[in-house]
Image (cartoon, rainbow, N blue to C red):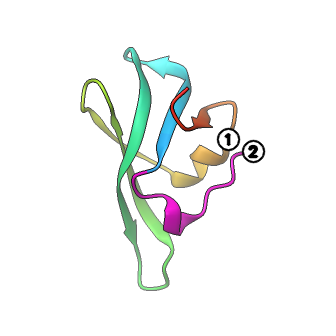
């Protein structure tokens, strides 16, 4: 399990375990919070193609999908 704190999510780097669209390395480029400081939106950007994807930030905790850092 990757330990991810919502406050340290922005600009964090991630590697997809199963690359999709030949995209493997990602960086969190946007995190939106509500009034209670809960994450309501998280956007990751592929490093090579610059494609952006909205994901559920808690998915980053799943080590079968994501690895912390670029590996």
- Which residue is at 43% across, 29% downward? 25
Residue that mark 1 sits on: 62
Q: Are marks 1 and 2 in contact (CB under 8 Å)?
A: yes
Residue that mark 2 sits on: 1
| Residue count near mark 1 (Cα–Cα under 10 Å), binned few <14, some 14–19, many ≥20 | few
- Which residue is at 75% across, 45% downward? 1
Q: In the picture shown, does residue 30 fall above or below 35?
A: above
Q: Quadrant of residue 31?
A: bottom left
Q: In the picture shown, does residue 62 fall above or below 8?
A: above
Distance CA(mark 1)–CA(mark 2): 6 Å
Q: Does the magenta segment cover residue 22? A: no
Q: Which residues are magenta?
A: 1-11
Q: Going by the image, does 49 lie left or right of 65?
A: left
Q: In the picture shown, does residue 24 fall above or below 62?
A: above
Q: Quadrant of residue 6?
A: bottom right
Q: Residue furthest bottom?
A: 35
- Which residue is at 41% across, 78% downward? 34
- Which residue is at 69% across, 36% downward? 63
Q: Quadrant of residue 69?
A: top right
Q: Percent from the top left, x then y, of residue 29?
A: 33, 51
Q: In the picture shown, does residue 30 fall above or below 54?
A: below
**Dominant secondary structure, magenta:** loop
Q: Percent from the top left, x then y, of residue 60?
A: 58, 45
């Amino acid at each position: 399990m990757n330990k991810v704190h919502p406050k340290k999510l922005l600009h964090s780097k991630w590697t997809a375990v199963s690359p999709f669209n030949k995209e493997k390395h990602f960086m969190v480029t946007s995190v939106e919070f509500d009034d209670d400081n809960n994450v309501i939106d998280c956007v990751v950007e592929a490093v090579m193609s610059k494609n952006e994807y909205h994901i559920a930030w808690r998915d980053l905790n799943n080590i079968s999908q994501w690895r912390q850092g670029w590996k």
